[in-house]
Amino acid sequence: MDLKECRERIDVIDAQLAALFTERMEVAEAVARYKIDHGMQVLDTAREAQKLDKAETMVPAKEREGIREVFTLLMALSRRRQHELLQQAGPESGTEERDTQ
């Protein structure tokens, strides 16, 4: 593959990643609505640790540090979106903020 072909392939992958990111954030909003309705906290450290460990098993050893960083960022962005929805729901939602990230 020449440089042009590599860049075209990266462009296709980037478009797929963007679509998957959008879908993930939509699901994060659904999670937030569920947590609001059930008085749950946004941060679930045990779940996040499990997700990071699982992500590492999905890639070759040389990619583990990178995938951990990617998933850490994805989860931080998801938490931020959940916090935004929680704030919009107001104090009547029954959830308490304990995640300071």
Image (cartoon, helix red, strand yellow):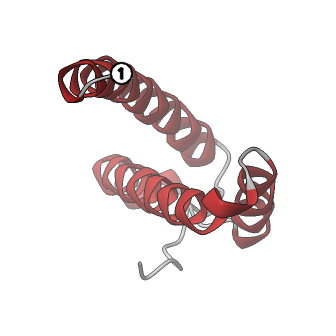
Instruction: Answer with left or right where residue 67 lies relative to residue 56.
Output: left
Q: Quadrant of residue 76?
A: bottom left
Q: As shown in the figure, which amino acid type bears the numbered disc 1?
A: Met
Residue at 81% over, 51% down: 57
Question: Is 39 rendered above or below residue 29?
Answer: below
State the residue lying farthest toward the front: 2
Question: Is 99 rendered above or below residue 32?
Answer: below
State the residue lying farthest toward the left: 4
Residue at 40% over, 61% down: 91
Question: Is 55 rendered above or below residue 52?
Answer: above
Instruction: Provide residue 18's location: percent of width, then percent of height.
Output: 32, 28
Residue at 60% over, 67% down: 43
Helix, strand or loop at label 1? It is loop
Q: Quadrant of residue 67?
A: bottom right
* Residue highlighted by disc 1: 1
Q: How many labels does the image show?
A: 1
Instruction: Provide residue 16's location: percent of width, then percent of height.
Output: 38, 20
Instruction: Provide residue 69's location: percent of width, then percent of height.
Output: 50, 66
